[in-house]
Amino acid sequence: GESVGLHLPTLSVQEGDNSIINCAYSNSASDYFIWYKQESGKGPQFIIDIRSNMDKRQGQRVTVLLNKTVKHLSLQIAATQPGDSAVYFCAEVGGTSYGKLTFGQGTILTVHP
Amino acid sequence: DAGITQSPRHKVTETGTPVTLRCHQTENHRYMYWYRQDPGHGLRLIHYSYGVKDTDKGEVSDGYSVSRSKTEDFLLTLESATSSQTSVYFCATGTGVQETQYFGPGTRLLVL
């Protein structure tokens, strides 16, 4: 079936570096994408989203890029901090009547002080 | 967390017993969802609701039922718990089909 996946299961960076987390999706009908952050023992936390009519969206220290041609999403975190250490999921929405989210497996980001 | 609480936060139960998990939201969101999260499977949708008394199945609904008698509450029932239902259960809410879903803190369920 359709799925959303991540290229890298783990990413380790130094504090202050920029981080890039990638995600490939396979459903060309998906038209809304969300990045979530999940810390240990907590629920997924919304970070940023993007709709298919955009190719870039910026938030506070985060930027999401969408390349529909190659069905690829990325999350860029500027000046990564130890508090950014978590699992990051991309999720896609599309093709259903109820807002079904299809999640990737997640990337573990570890930030070293 | 968009005003979402889940109860209980932790539960240990025995195989064959019924279990009910509660999700409560204060945001008046129309849509509510129940997911389970397991290693190697990520988050999978169990059931969802698109309004009071309006519910439908997700991708892993066998062995589960739900009810929504009020906008703010969405209950998930394991009719006869099995060890394969040991998992972390998350509730989520959303305002619309193409809108963000906000997640609760989760319930850790262990079925012995």
Image: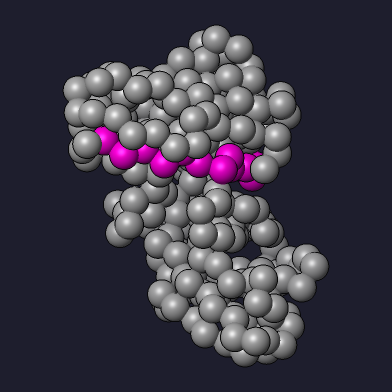
> Which residue: 41% across, 29% down?
B47
Q: Is residue B103 magenta?
A: yes
Q: Is residue B39 magenta?
A: no
The location of residue B14, given as percent across then percent down, is 23, 29
Q: Nearer the viewer, residue B92 or B105?
A: B105
Indicate the quadrant containing the C terminus of chain A: top left, top right, bottom left or bottom right: bottom right
Where are the magenta residues, as a range? B99-111
Q: Quadrant of residue B23?
A: top right
> What is the magenta segment's predominant secondary structure?
strand
The location of residue A9, given as percent across then percent down, is 41, 75
> Which residue: 46% across, 15% down?
B67
- Residue A2 appearing in the image: no
Q: Quadrant of residue A51?
A: bottom right
Q: Nearer the viewer, residue B111 or A31?
A: B111
Along the horizontal axis of the image, is B4 left or right of B64? right
B70 shown above or below B24: above
The location of residue A34, given as percent across then percent down, is 60, 56
Q: Quadrant of residue A65?
A: bottom right
> Which residue: 40% across, 21% down?
B20
Q: Nearer the viewer, residue A15 or B57?
A: A15
Outermost right residue: A60
The location of residue A24, given as percent across then percent down, is 45, 69
- Residue B66 appearing in the image: yes
Along the horizontal axis of the image, is A23 left or right of A60? left
